[in-house]
């Protein structure tokens, strides 16, 4: 899982770095994907800690995404809201690590990798 998170982060940085120079006045076509990626990271932050990974890896990944994007205050608030929505969606459902929580981790890891790869390949220069 550590390798997958490293790949996810690298792809996220690549996508955001390539896209940062794009105009910010109009919502870019990749914006929904980045917001979903933030939500996925929030979900993983809750679920991975629930299932034994103690730390702030996914929160740190989110902070790095914010740093690389350098968003306006309004856009930053949307990123944070997306991350928190992902976290809270599972916080209200799971109180212990279960088989379905581990399955959710696997699915969210795959989704995050796919989002990162798709954003970088479609919108990167």
Image (spheres, rainbow, N blue to C red):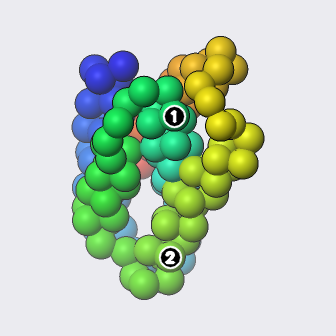
Residue at (51%, 34%) from the top-left corner?
50
Foreground label between 2 and 1: 1
Q: SS of the residue at dot 2? A: helix
In-front residue for pair 66/50: 50
In-front residue for pair 99/20: 99
Which mark is drawn over residue 77?
Answer: 2
Q: Which residue is mark 1?
A: 50
The relative height of residue 81 versus residue 87 in the rendered view (above or below) is below
Q: In which quadrant of the rendered view does residue 99 lie?
A: top right
Residue neighbourhood size for the residue with mark 1, other residues' Cα within 10 Å, grouped as few (<14), some (14–19), many (≥20)? some
Looking at the rendered structure, the number of numbered marks drawn on it comes to 2
Residue lying farthest top?
99
Question: Can residue 122 be seen at all in this image of the molecule?
Answer: no
Residue 57 at what x, y percent from top left? 31, 42
Q: SS of the residue at dot 1? A: helix
Asked if the residue at tag 1 contacts the one at tag 2, i.e. Cβ–Cβ closer than 8 Å, the answer is: no
User: Is residue 93 rendered to the left or right of residue 57?
Assistant: right
The relative height of residue 15 versus residue 118 in the rendered view (above or below) is below
Residue at (59%, 25%) from the top-left corner?
97
Residue at (37%, 52%) from the top-left corner?
59
Q: CA distance from mark 2 to mark 1?
A: 25 Å
Q: In which quadrant of the rendered view does residue 100 lie?
A: top right
The relative height of residue 124 versus residue 48 in the rendered view (above or below) is below
């Amino acid at each position: 899982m550590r390798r997958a998170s490293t790949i996810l982060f690298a792809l996220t940085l690549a996508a955001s770095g390539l896209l940062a120079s794009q105009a910010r006045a109009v919502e870019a076509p990749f914006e929904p994907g980045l917001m979903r990626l933030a939500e996925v990271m929030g979900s993983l932050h809750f679920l991975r800690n629930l299932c034994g990974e103690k730390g702030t890896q996914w929160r740190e990944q989110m902070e790095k995404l914010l740093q690389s994007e350098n968003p306006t205050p309004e856009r930053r608030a949307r990123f944070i809201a997306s991350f928190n929505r992902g976290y809270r969606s599972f916080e209200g459902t799971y109180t212990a690590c279960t088989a379905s929580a581990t399955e959710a981790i696997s699915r969210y890891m795959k989704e995050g990798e796919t989002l990162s790869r798709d954003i970088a390949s479609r919108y990167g220069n």
